[in-house]
Image (cartoon, rainbow, N blue to C red):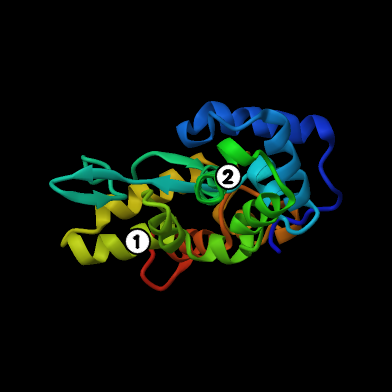
Amino acid sequence: MTETQTETMTDDQLFELAKDLISDYAELQNVKTDDLVKILSAADKKSDMVYAMLTSKYQIIQMEQRDCDWTPINNTGSGVTKTVPASKLLRDIAADGISYQLNYNDYEHNGLTDNILYFAVNSFATYDVDWIYKNVKHYSDLVNKHYCDFAYAKIYQYMHFKDHDEFETGLLNDLCKIYDYQMKCDEFYIIPEDQAKRLLPCDRKIMWDLAYGENAKKN
């Protein structure tokens, strides 16, 4: 696991997360807060998913639809579209799974039975968070959302653009902007994984390649 959970979440943390989910997702607005806390608490004991939904520092790209195509490239071609916390995708996955199971098992009439609790928890707590981080585009597609990592944006660039220079400069700038401190790219790249910095490991590789790879621009 790239972002390591060291302890279970507190009741206050679970309550705040439950309130956020109910507020942010229309499909959860009829769920009782206490029931959602029970679901999150049970899931927290089973996997790192709930912890990462609240604490993940990683950033991913929220794509935009342009000319009937979902793109990670901004409209000037000089960088990427909006970046958001990876926790947003994790919450999308949880909300999608929980709401499906609650509806399928008629939560509205039955309340949170042990059976419904079991299926609601397993609808998202069985996901491997680290695997989601490695396959952002795939998992966003599963919940009909449009996110990707910077590595995907790089691939998209080569598929759609002939002149790469402007974009590569913009991509490197975007990668630097979302980091917490002003550091050189080489210093950034070697930061230990357990410090949970803001770029996914695959995106640190992109930054390294842009700055120091064999095709990097020479100053």
The residue nearer to you, when weighing 106 against 143, is: 106
Q: Is residue 148 left or right of residue 185?
A: left
Helix, strand or loop status at disc 1: helix
Residue that badge 2 annotates: 87
* Residue depicted at x 75% and y 41%: 38
Judging depth in this view, the residue of 113 and 161 nearest the camera is 113
Residue furthest to the left in view is: 67
Taking the image as drawn, is residue 185 in sight?
yes
Mark 2 residue type:
Ser
Q: Residue 92, relative to residue 192: is it above or below?
A: above
Tags 1 and 2 touching, CB below 8 Å: no
- Could you tell me which residue is drawn at 44 percent across and 70 percent down? 213
Left or right: 146 with respect to 194?
left
Question: Which quarter of the figure has residue 115?
Answer: bottom right
- SS type, badge 2: helix
Mark 1 is on which residue type?
Lys
Residue 217 seen in this snapshot: no
213 left or right of 45 in image: left
Q: Nearer the viewer, mark 1 or mark 2?
A: 2
Figure label count: 2
User: Could you tell which of marks 1 and 2 lies nearer the N-terminus?
Assistant: 2
Looking at the rendered image, the quarter that the N terminus falls into is bottom right
Indicate which disc residue 12 carries.
Answer: none
**Residue at image coords 19%, 61%:** 160
Spatial separation of the CA atoms under disc 1 and disc 2: 22 Å
The 10 Å Cα crowd at callout 1, few under 14, some 14 to 19, many 20 or more, is: some
**Mark sitting on residue 154:** 1
Q: Foreground: 73 or 173? A: 73
Answer with left or right where residue 101 lies relative to residue 163: right
